[in-house]
Image (cartoon, rainbow, N blue to C red):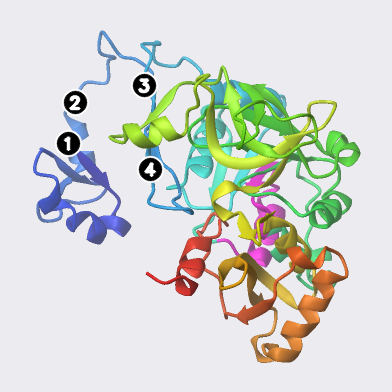
Amino acid sequence: MLITSPAQLGNARQLEGHIPACQHLFVCAEKDGDFQSLEDAMAGLPVTPIADECEGADMLYSSGTTGKPKGIKPELSCDPLGTPSPLFNLISAMYMTPDEEMRYLSPAPLYHAAPLRYNMTFLRTGSTCIVMEKFDEERYLQLVEQYRITHSQLVPTMFIRMLKLPAATREKYDVSSLRGVIHAAAPCPIPVKEQMIEWWGPIIHEYYAGTEGMGFTTISSPEWLTHKGSVGKAILGEVRIVDDETGELAPVGETGTIYFANGLPFEYHNDPEKTRKATNQQGWTTLGDVGYEDEEGYLYLTDRKAYMIISGGVNIYPQEAEDTLVTHPKVADVAVFGVPNDEFGEEVKAVVQPADMSEAGPALAEELITYCRSKLSSIKCPRSIDFEAELPRHPTGKLYKRLLKDRYWPK
């Protein structure tokens, strides 16, 4: 069956001819053409549980920032309805304050895994959830004050946009009700997180995980202040850093592909080859990210493996340049990636969304390149910068870098 809301009915109609096996079409409103009213259909049904009712699991899709979205099929269990999921247990233990009334603010749409699952988890505890259709930095602060929000989940881009508000705007909103703020989805520039902790206090938690559910690391603000840049230690699965050239475990402090051992099983729907590529000979699985561990076992993300630039045989991870450039006051957003170079194979390119588009031009490009080189080795910095009025970001904050990169590579 297909169930849709009135707002998405137009999109749902486009699917009708492509799903011949679908026997029932429902809309959460009055009957509309072939779509029956879900409320009317439910009205005559019993509310007593069926004999074999079980908890089940969702099958969500990845966001598709590096390619086509992938259906992620978890291993099903026959646990009775109401059995807490591993994610519910993790969130409850790490981030919630169940002895208080909780009000959760979601600044991202519910068709993405983290906003959907976190809203459902907070709802399951009896919390109130407020959902924004689209993130707006000042509106977010208004809602925190208006509803006395206690918990929320954001991404680094949202932190950056709030920090770039005028100080007077930030200071006029009361955010003292916040008890736990969670962030993930992308590495957070160290200066950005330092400023957020200074503003909101040591209530910010970070985690590293994926829709696949293969593993989960987490770190609190006090831990992060002594391990700046880390995404924490694993509490689900076990981190393994693998040297791509040898296939062996990388030494402490050395960068490699991040795998999880003994995590939750999953497969990519109808794509055994993609499942195989995400799994190594030891049965460890990866999201395709690159990073390293320190001597205490704290994990640090370097970048996505797919985004690595190879220039003259040197591996360059663009996250470093992005984290540097985005702290410049004239930069609202930035993407760094590799473009063709006849001599070196690839060179570093940046596409910048300036805070003021009228300033875009050669002078600003030179200023930003100089700024980057003052903080990083020149080989890691862009050799050229283009400007866009707005970068293609997912409403959850994830950057569709491939949409920018594809413009510069021959088909």
Q: Nearer the viewer, residue 99 or 376?
A: 376
- CB contact under 8 Å: marks 1 and 2: yes
Magenta residues span 135-157
Few, some or many residues within 10 Å of mark 3 (<14, 14–19, 20+): some
The magenta stretch spans residue 152: yes
Badge 2: residue crowd in 10 Å (few <14, some 14–19, many ≥20):
few
Residue 225 sits in quarter: top right
Q: In this figure, which residue is indicated by the disc labeled 3?
A: 56
Which circle's residue, 4 or 1, is located before the other in the chain? Answer: 1
The residue singled out by tag 4 in the image is 70
Q: Give the Cα separation between the discs numbered 4 and 1.
A: 32 Å
Quadrant of the frame with the C terminus:
bottom left
Mark 1 vs mark 3, foreground winner is 3
Between the residue at mark 1 and the residue at mark 2, the CA separation in whole angstroms equals 8 Å
Do residues under tags 3 and 2 come within 8 Å of each other at their CB atoms?
A: no
Residue linked to disc 2: 45
Three-letter amino acid code at disc 2? Leu
Pinpoint residue 35: horizontal percent, then vertical percent: 15, 49
Q: CA distance from mark 3 to mark 4?
A: 20 Å
Which quadrant: the N terminus? top left
Q: Report the residue at 86% width, 52% height from top.
A: 194
Mark 1 — residue?
41
Dot 4 surroundings within 10 Å: few (below 14), some, or many (20 or more)?
some
Left or right: residue 71 versus residue 392 is left
Of callouts 4 and 2, the N-terminal one: 2
Query: CB under 8 Å between callouts 3 and 4?
Result: no
How would you rate the neighbour count of disc 1 (Cα within 10 Å): few for under 14, some for 14-19, many for 20 or more?
A: few
* Between discs 3 and 2, the one toward the N terminus: 2
Residue type indicated by callout 3:
Gly
Disc on res. 249: none
